[in-house]
Image: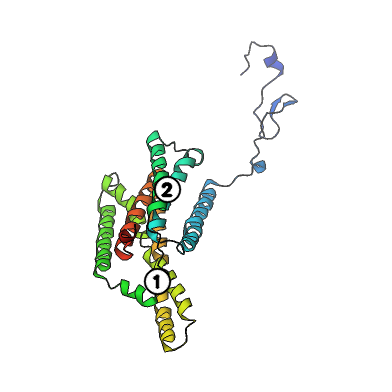
Amino acid sequence: PLSSSNPMSNNHSLQSPSSQDGYHLDNTTIPTTTNRNPKNTLSLHPKTTSWILYLLGMIGMSFLNPLFCVLAMKYANPSILAPFSGLTLVWVVTFSSATLGEHPGWGQRVACGLIVGGEILVAVFGDHTNGEEKSVEDVLSSYQEPAFRAFIVFMTLFLLQLGIFIHVCPKQSLLRKVAWGSIGGSITGFQNFLKDGLTIIHATSRQSQLAGSTATTTTTTASSHLPIFVFFGMATAFLGLLFLASCMKRYDATYSAAMFVVSFILSASLMSAVHYHTLDHL
């Protein structure tokens, strides 16, 4: 403000700033350095931006990721492919500082290096069988094995226990945090439905070239069971991603991705050992 003792104060008065033209001193306009007119600012509402990013992430996780998983299933079984999901954590840690404002520590960076080294070991020494030689009858009979049924019962009880922890434990509880981080990957680990569905399609394609009643019976059996495998394959993938998105709402992205990857690898590897007997092919 101008002092009353200042001779300029009797002849000049400082007016309020204008958002468009700048400051007015009598009849002289002093333009401001920045234009404050919101009409010239091209920006989206934060809520709109949030929804756009959320939808893009869901499209990537619910469409693009399963698409490439389906293509990869042609060449290897889940025991090989599941550990490569650990690269998700590597990308999250690598770009979290620039995109999310989360600065990973040295421990997380060392962990990323161990993950990359583990991928190399899995790629070299893992089970490289893909089960393309199986018939439709072989796929269906594998679900009658006692070991696989025991695995289904065990995983069902485990998922129910995680759900109880989420519902009962306090918000700051460690058990609740671990349950939120593990439930999505544990559900997504049921990769057998996707893999066996593809095996049925390939087996049907081979056997459809055969003549006779046997081929007709096999095709009928496959067509009746294939929708079930497709449904469960899509349901487990989508539910797992929903729980992952819910976990990211409550905890940081690095923790959510890490727990999802760990639980997914453990679930898929245990399933492969029981259902595909991968330990016999190492």
Along the viewing direction, whichever of 190 and 218 lies nearer the viewer: 218
| Residue 104 place in picture, x, y as percent | 42, 37
The residue positioned 35% from the left and 48% from the top of the image is 259
Give residue 155's quadrant in the image: bottom left
Q: Is residue 241 above or below residue 96?
A: below
The residue positioned 29% from the left and 53% from the top of the image is 166
Please rate how many residues cluster around mark 1, counting C-alpha atoms within 10 Å: few if below 14, some from 14 to 19, many from 20.
some
| Residue 235 place in picture, x, y as percent | 40, 65
| Residue 11 place in picture, x, y as percent | 72, 17
Specify the farthest residue to the bottom.
Answer: 213
Residue kind at label 1, given as amino acid type: Phe
Is residue 252 visible from the viewing direction of this image?
no
| Residue 175 place in picture, x, y as percent | 26, 48
From the image, which quarter does the C terminus lie in? bottom left
Q: Is residue 207 above or below residue 197?
A: below
Residue kind at label 2, given as amino acid type: Ile
Q: Element type at marker 1?
A: helix
Relative to 144, 211 lies left or right: right
The residue positioned 43% from the left and 82% from the top of the image is 219
Of the residues tagged 2 and 1, which is closer to the observer? 2
From the image, which quarter does the N terminus lie in? top right
Q: How is the image coloured?
A: rainbow
Along the viewing direction, whichever of 209 and 177 lies nearer the viewer: 209
Instruction: Indicate which disc residue 120 carries.
Output: 2
Please rate how many residues cluster around mark 2, counting C-alpha atoms within 10 Å: few if below 14, some from 14 to 19, many from 20.
few
Relative to 6, 177 lies left or right: left
Give residue 204's quadrant in the image: bottom left
Where does label 1 land, which residue?
Answer: 229
Q: Is residue 273 above or below residue 262?
A: below
**Quick one: label 2 or label 1, which is nearer the N terminus?**
2
Q: Element type at marker 2?
A: helix
Q: CA distance from mark 2 to mark 1?
A: 31 Å
